[in-house]
Image: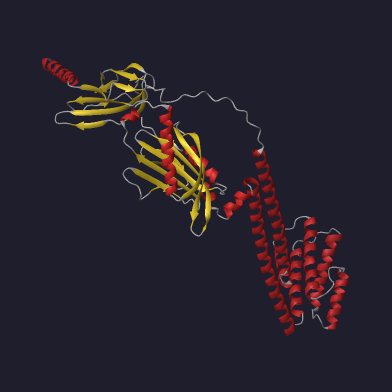
Amino acid sequence: MKKGIVFLVYCFAQLGFAQLSTEVTTAVDSTQVRIGEQINLTLQVKTDALSMVEFPPEPQFLPFEIIEESAIDTLRAQQHYLFTKRYALIQFDSGAYWIPPQKIIVDGFSKFSDSIAIQVATVEVDTLKQPLFDIKPIQQVERSYAKLIQNILWGVVFLLLVGVLYYLNKQYQKKRDALLEEIPPFDRAIQELKALESQVLNEQEEYKLYYSRLTDVVRRYLEEEASIDALESTSDELLEKLELRKDAGTLDLSIETLNNLKKVLQNADLVKFARSAPALGIATEDRKMVEQVVIETKEALPAPTLEELEATAAFQREMERKRRKQKIQLIGISSLSMLVLAALGAIAFYGFTPVKDTLFRYPTKLLLDGVWVQSQYGTPPVQIQTPEVLLRNPASTAQTIIYNSGDPLEGVYTQLFFEKRSPKEEDKKEKSQEEQEAEARAILDASIERYEALGATNLLVQNENFTSADGTEALKMAGSLDLTQEGQEPLRCRFVSVIFPFETSTVELTLIYSKEDRYGADIEERILNSLEIIKEL
């Protein structure tokens, strides 16, 4: 009994010792952060043995929000084990806060992490450097019917397409029926009789329709192949005409064949006019007898002469040629109709000139509609969208860096010019209005000299104010100039320069394109609207 008590005391002592050897460490990368800045919190459990460690499944860090949490990282050191879990926290309100302690279960026992004080500071905004603007007033927009007109035009185009497809389908059906009629009479008669073979007859109306088609097959065949007026004749008249042809020796049919045909015609008259229903199997026998009449008539007809065969072959060739011609015409008309409708729809939606310029690949139209490139260049970084990527010019030096693309004589010329300069002591002093104007004139004169270096003459210059997309104010110089072309008259061009005179550098955007270009103004507007100076925080 005493040994058992001693053993239990020993076990509880070991458990207590294990719990005393467990350490929970709480750490953050910074206790002072700004609004919206990430805080990295680390919870670490150190034990002397491989224990069962459970971190909180749903940790609560209010008023902080959890951005991300990592999986448990287990590491074995020399004499102990480390269990580590990391959390990324964030807070969007300034003030002093506490990260609350977290409950961690180690071998069924609870351990708590330390609470940590965090100071969240606001971000100072310099309203002197960043201009403030009033809220723009509500602008009245005129009612536009462009969307309604667009929907109506698309509806008209759709109806025209449906009409054209319906017309083409009807024409195809007519051509198909015409091709079916060109099947030789004997083959067509056999096909129609085979089609009657699969019919199942139950009611009197079905027998009537069956015998009507059966007699039509034999009558049409005799009229087309034997040249007998069969469709317009009664049954007795038809039999009489066949007997006359037999007596004349032009159609050698046996007496049995004529009797079989007479029997079929009588049964057909009884079904159609007396509304009788033949006995089971008689309709099938009548079909077989009509098929035998057709076959014997084919054999009884005199063999065609050589001239008739040649005429028939020539006729077939001519018909085949006509079919090919009609098929090609049908495909051509269909394709042309679709192209015309598509062109009319595009012209109605976009206008005649844009469609024409797209089809004939007008250079600046292709630039405007192509995939534009947005990128950053130079220092300070200038972000801009251009039709083509700007490449570094080989003429760049350590002090001046040039990025350009395009050719003003063939499209739109775009250039970014960066010039480094060392600030002087007098530049740090406040300047008078006259000194500022003189400095601006010097910058503009330097820009004009660069135009003249490109071969420009007859410059007409107009100065304007300009503000980039990020709110940076700049000098804008625009106007017209002449660019000489070898062996041709000078090309009158429009040019635009946007100049940013910073303390340590000058950044200039240059655009040159022909004044007669229809899409140059649209490209200029899109480029200038995308111009932005990336300011470092």
Closer to the camera in the image, 510 or 523 = 510
536 left or right of 193?
Answer: left
Q: Is residue 378 visible?
A: no
Q: Which residue is at 41% across, 37% downward?
A: 442
Q: Where is residue 272? Give x, y as percent.
A: 84, 60
From the viewer's perspective, tell me whether residue 53 is left or right of residue 141.
left
Please state the horizontal and vertical placement of residue 304, each as a whole percent of the image: 74, 82
Q: Is residue 216 above or below residue 470?
A: below
Q: Image quarter for residue 42?
A: top left
Q: Quadrant of the N terminus?
A: top left
**Which residue is at the front of the view, 253 or 451?**
451
> Is residue 179 depicted above or below 535 in this figure?
below
The colour style of the image is secondary structure
Q: Quadrant of residue 311?
A: bottom right
Q: Quadrant of the C terminus?
A: top left
Residue 66's spot in the image, x, y percent? 36, 25
Q: Write the residue at 65% across / 35% down.
A: 144
Regarding residue 143, the answer to whether it shows in the image is: yes
The image quadrant that residue 506 belongs to is top left
The residue shown at (58%, 52%) is 357
Q: Residue at x 82, y 64 (%)?
A: 268
Q: Position of residue 161 (x, y in %)?
A: 67, 51
Q: Please give left or right for residue 116 compared with residue 158 in the image.
A: left
